[in-house]
Amino acid sequence: MSRGKSHDPVAELFGEFGDRLRGDRWLPDVDVFESTSSVVVRFELAGVRSEDLRVTVDGGMLRVSGVRRVLDRSDVKRLHQMEIATGPFERRVQIPVPIDREAVSANLADGFLTVVLPRREAGPRQVEIEE
């Protein structure tokens, strides 16, 4: 045990990732970048199924939440190392530009969730007058 840290028997047994055994939330890694037409947000979500994901856009906030389920470990006799986070997660990303909420798309492939948020056209807009 290192100096300055309190005694934590779970951490002693399972290392720095013991909090995940208690069901605490984890945070997936995320990349955010802009193209000329959209903002793209990629989440690293290996092992997460699409039915266990929820993507919402509220104003300029993108929220991705879900759960990575624990694999069947009924045959495990002894754990030697456990670093892959399981359980619930939630990640919120503030989108820095106006977006077209109706055109947002999400795709889960190869362990990555890619959310494309098209930019909303800036500038004047001609409004039709109804009679």
Image: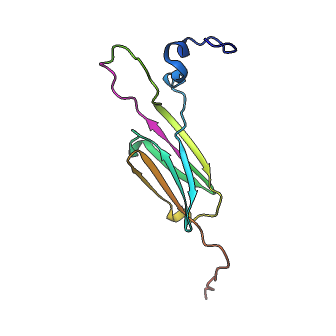
Image quarter hosting the N terminus:
top right
Question: Where does residue 76 sit, x and y in percent of width and height?
Answer: 33, 18
- The quarter of the image holding the C terminus is bottom right
Percent across and percent down for residue 94 are: 63, 52
Q: Vertically, is 109 above or below 29?
A: below
Residue 29 vs residue 100, the one in the foreground: 29
Total marks in image: 0
Give the residue at x 48% y 40%.
66
> Vertical placement of 15 versus 123: above or below?
above
Q: Position of residue 22 (x, y in %)?
A: 52, 22
Residue 119 placement: quadrant: bottom right
The reply, left or right, for residue 21 in relation to residue 58 is: left
Residue 23, x across and y down, in percent? 51, 26
Residue nearest the observer in this picture, 126 or 16: 16
30 horizontally vs 80: left or right: right
The part of the image, by quadrant, that contains residue 73 is: top left
Residue in the foreground of this view, choosing between 36 and 105:
36
Magenta stretch contains residue 102? no
Is 74 one of the magenta-colored residues? yes
Q: Residue at x 53, y 14 (%)?
A: 10
In the displayed image of the protein, which residue is found farthest to the right? 4
What residue sits 55% from the left and 11% below the top?
A: 9
Over which residues does the magenta segment extend?
Answer: 64-75
